[in-house]
Image (cartoon, rainbow, N blue to C red):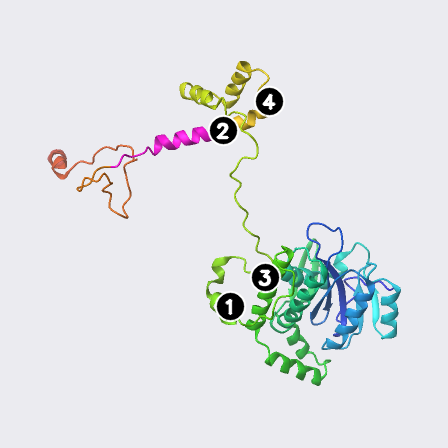
Amino acid sequence: MPVRTFGDWKEPPPGYLEIDLVAHCGESAAGSFVHTFTLTDIASGWTECVPLAVREATLVVEAVSKLRAELPFKLLGLDSDNGSEFLNETMIAWCKDNGVEYTRSRPYHKNDQAWVEQKNGAIVRRLVGYHRFEGLVATATLSRLYSVARLFQNFFQPSFQLASKTRIGARVIKKYHSAETPCARLLRMNIVPDEVKERLRSAAAKLDPLRLLDEIRALQEHLTKLSAGEVSRVCASSGSGLARFLDSLSTAWKSGEVRPTHCQPEKARHWWRTRKDPFEAVWSKVVCWLEVEPDRTSKELFHRLQHEQPGLFPDGQLRTLQRRVKEWRRAEAHRLIFPTRPATPNAAGDGHSTVPLGEPDRGWCLPVSRAPTIAEDAPREADVQQVRAQLVASAL
């Protein structure tokens, strides 16, 4: 099997693809789960994704045979890693029978497949996330998602392509071509036949990027529910919520992450106790000690409890007492700074406060010195004028 490195591609024509698998196993690799089969064209960046219910060589060959007829260029070569789903007699025999050049990367050199590895993160993971998917229902939903996403990515999603790379010592200078979509790159290439370019133009003219994005969001939401076990069937066809989707674009920035596959559900705050409070019976005594001697540390109080009740409080409970004492001190400081203000009777005598609505209640503020009035400032100003006149007379 010939070996191809990342520097051996040079400038190939459209039709040489790198292939790889992305596992949707979640946090555990046990059991059977869905994989995404990714193919990326080196020259144009055209990317196709196919979900596989299991990781098996026969399914990989069938996926390549199906995609071969849908690609806008002739399949000339495939480059894979060293996985057993790629390096097997079935795959090698199919490539030889169909005149497809087949190469592999070096073991433990992921950068040899930099093009497809980048698409694994920029397309597959951004669309699907890192949830676990199992079974035929998840495979069918992923297939529908990729059938819509391939049109959005290849016709409307521009990307940069490396033009040159120069190394000066430890510094690497990279220059990129202008951002283009894979479709635009194929239309710009002279090697692509005119009939293929005409099919690409007619297909692009019929597509609506907003409608495609709406369908992607709906399928992502269904995948999220599928991974959580909330649904067990393929979702119905999308498209009726396009008006709602368009209305939400103006306020989408307020919601943060809008992709359902990346939005994490908000966890409930853990406010309840899971263990019995070991200081419940003696806490009133500890509070009395703190009120008499507030400067005592939690460690001193804990040793005092151990001395009075030996064997009841092990050393590991010191941290619990420290947290309780810290909360007590915080509450006492808040009570001293913000004391409870009794309600002042208003004109009606109903006992409600007379602070106007929208104005701050200054009842908790510490007393400050009263500012002098204008009448009190007048004698001080006269004294200043008298001193100033004396200074002018002495200068003359």
The residue labelled by disc 4 is 315
Residue 204 position in % (x across, y down): 61, 79
Three-letter residue code for mark 1: Phe
Who is closer to the viewer here, 201 or 174?
A: 201
The residue labelled by disc 1 is 245
Residue 332 part of the magenta-drawn span = yes
| Disc 2 from disc 4: Cα separation | 16 Å
Tag 3–tag 4 contact (CB < 8 Å): no
Helix, strand or loop at label 2? It is: helix
The residue labelled by disc 2 is 324
Picture quadrant of residue 120? bottom right
* Dot 4 alpha-carbon crowd within 10 angstroms: few under 14, some 14 to 19, many 20 or more: few
Tag 1–tag 4 contact (CB < 8 Å): no
Residue 264 position in % (x across, y down): 57, 53
| Disc 1 from disc 3: Cα separation | 13 Å
Tag 1–tag 3 contact (CB < 8 Å): no
Residue occupying the point 85% across, 75% down = 98
Three-letter residue code for mark 4: Asp
Which label was assigned to residue 221?
3
